[in-house]
């Protein structure tokens, strides 16, 4: 057993499997809880959302929002977590309203742009950017990569000479 984990790829395989489990846990937690992590800098700040229905199609997304502070003080670095108080119908209405705004002439006049498909979203303005990656994509890629690292046979090292 010790020999099995002596290679770097096996150790990295276990690490990616643990990462897949963490994202799966965030995915499941997102059905009842909205988490937001804010990372403040001097001129910019970043916000990470872990959610299942606030953004996207309700299947769960990891949402990143970056913004330039524009002279305003950026928010404090920290973590905010709260449970959903909206019914699924109210959440669906919010999603539809956001989708309608994203394609409206008002949004285009403000410089808002967006591209989306299969649950992925990328968009923004001159002072902000948004990226949403569905949990299913993160978990499936990490799991497949972990499987390959853990189960593939390593080739013997052919030294120089």
Image (cartoon, rainbow, N blue to C red):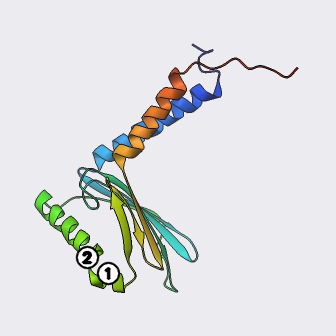
Q: Nearer the viewer, residue 39 or 13?
A: 13
Distance from the alpha carbon under mark 2 to that under mark 1: 6 Å
Q: Which residue is mark 1?
A: 107
Against 85, residue 135 (above or below) is: above
Where residue 152 appears, as percent x and y from the top left, is 54, 21
Q: Is residue 119 visible?
A: yes
Residue at left offset 65%, top offset 21%: 6
> Where does the C terminus fall, quadrant-wise?
top right
The reply, left or right, for residue 87 in relation to residue 153 is left
Q: SS at mark 1?
A: helix
Against 86, residue 137 (above or below) is: above
Labels 2 and 1 touching (C-beta < 8 A): yes
Q: SS at mark 2?
A: helix
Q: Nearer the viewer, residue 11 or 75?
A: 11
The reply, left or right, for residue 14 in relation to residue 63 is right
Q: Is residue 75 visible?
A: no
Residue at left offset 33%, top offset 57%: 117
Residue at left offset 45%, top offset 74%: 128
Q: Which residue is mark 2?
A: 101
């Amino acid at each position: 057993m010790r020999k099995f984990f002596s290679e770097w790829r096996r150790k990295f395989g276990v690490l990616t499997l643990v990462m897949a489990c963490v994202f799966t846990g965030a995915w499941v937690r997102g059905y009842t809880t909205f988490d937001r992590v804010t990372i403040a800098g001097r001129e910019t700040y970043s916000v990470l959302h872990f959610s299942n229905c606030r953004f996207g199609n309700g299947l769960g997304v990891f949402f990143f929002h970056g913004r330039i502070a524009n002279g305003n003080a950026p928010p404090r670095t920290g973590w905010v977590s709260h449970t959903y108080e909206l019914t699924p119908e109210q959440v669906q209405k919010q999603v539809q309203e956001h989708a309608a705004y994203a394609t409206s002439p008002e949004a285009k006049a403000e410089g808002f742009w967006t591209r989306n498909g299969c649950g992925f979203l990328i968009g923004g303005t001159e002072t902000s950017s948004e990226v949403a990656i569905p949990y299913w994509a993160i978990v499936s890629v990490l799991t497949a990569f972990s499987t390959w690292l853990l189960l593939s046979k390593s080739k013997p090292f052919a030294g120089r000479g």
